[in-house]
Image (cartoon, rainbow, N blue to C red):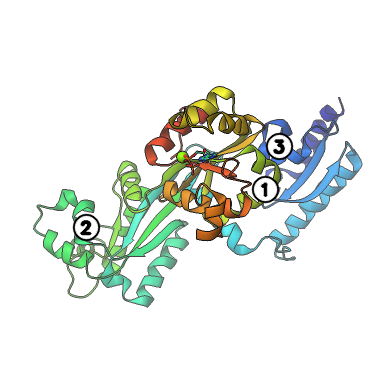
Amino acid sequence: GPCKAVVNLFRKLKNEFGEDDGLHFAVAEADSIPTLQPFRNKCEPVFLFCVNGKIITIVRGVNAPLISKKITELVQEEREIAAGQKERDEVLTKQIVEDASRQLAFFFPNFGIKRTDQKVEKTLALIRPSLLKERRRKYSVLQRIKDDGFKIAMQKEIILSEEQTREFYKEHENQDYFPVLLEQMTSGPTLILALTRENAVAHWRDLLGPKTVEEAMKENPNSLRAKYAVNNIPIAQLHGSSTPDDAQKELQFFFPQEHTLALIKPAAAKKHKDDIMQKVKEAGFTISKIKEEALTHEMATQFYKDHKGKPFFEHLVTCMTEGPSVVMILTKENAVEEWRQLMGPTDPEVAKVTSPESIRAQFAQDILSNAVHGSSNREHALESIECVFGEIDID
Ligand code: ADP
Ligand code: MG
């Protein structure tokens, strides 16, 4: 029908403007994408114009001249912005954009990359305590990291315990330098960085240069290990993972990600979905998967099998199957425990007293229809994630 004609219009515009203008067209089926729910059950096509992931204009219905005009205007504007003749209206705060792109880079490293030979990788970098103390040199290393095209996906500063150091360096335990390494690593805070870039592992190692300060000074005085050596300390002040496999393990060591299954129960999904989603995001969870779906009787029974035989069991199953739930996999360090904290106690009357900021205190009707569900431990989390989403691959 008319949609076909529009596709041709898009082709023509894309040809006219070419690849460099960042112009992309995509077709989205509102029926299969939860975020597009407001657009469901309408027979006319809707055209959404997005800049930097934010919808800035909507055209309803097939109005070719209007669509064409809008696109031309937007491309023109982008060209002016790119040429530095115009400033972008900052609709999005910088922080949100940065957070979003860091998380995107970490969880979907290849998102938006066209060619497969430029695979984006993650690697772990450490700035050890003695260098970290020297503020100016620390900033200079961070600057170098950015200049070389790395994104810092995650970072934290921690003082490693002896136990953590032994665990992290267990392959080095018998080396003669180990005691000095141990002393160094536990002497103050270390800065731990998750870096992403194409070919991150090898590129970061190339920048670092030879393993020891002595070799680095001799063989490659421009390497970072030579440049950022600290007087009188034989241990190099910078670390990088050796291989992509090691990187994966080392990242998991310092930034252990956990998944939990979270569900907004039907009654709350109808009334308070946006408020609850807002709380999920504010608490820093990554939503690794999401779908809206009414649980079947079997699924609800399986979900709450531990409660079979309790007086409220039948009511529970009914309340869980009466409409669509929002089902999510939430990912964060310590996700299982933190989601339970955010939900609050099972009984909202208790929640109101002991954790008034919790979701159940604010959005539950009563102890049965208490707004949200969350796995009670890691084992249950894995089990129910598999039950709802099947075998999935989230890393
Ligand atoms: P939680 O959801 O906090 O893990 P439980 O696993 O103990 O709590 O219970 C599962 C669900 O059963 C609760 O979320 C609630 O919907 C319902 N439920 C629990 N206790 C009662 C009760 N005494 N009366 C009615 N419903 C209950
Ligand atoms: Mg439970």
Residue type, mark 1 in image: His
Element under label 3? loop
- What residue is disc 3 on? 26
Give percent across and percent down for residue 301.
51, 26
Q: Of marks 2 and 3, which one's residue comes earlier in the chain?
A: 3
Q: Of marks 3 and 1, which one's residue comes earlier in the chain?
A: 3
Tell me if 94 is positioned left or right of 74 in this view: left
- What residue is disc 2 on? 165
Q: Nearer the viewer, residue 240 or 97?
A: 97
Q: How many marks?
A: 3
Do residues under tags 3 and 1 come within 8 Å of each other at their CB atoms? Answer: no
Distance from Cα at disc 3 to Cα at disc 1: 30 Å
Q: Residue at x 8, y 58 (%)?
A: 176
In the image, residue 385 sits, relative to residue 334, either above or below, namely above
Discs 3/1, front: 1
Q: Residue at x 63, y 31 (%)?
A: 293
Q: Of marks 1 and 2, which one's residue comes earlier in the chain?
A: 2
Residue type, mark 2 in image: Thr
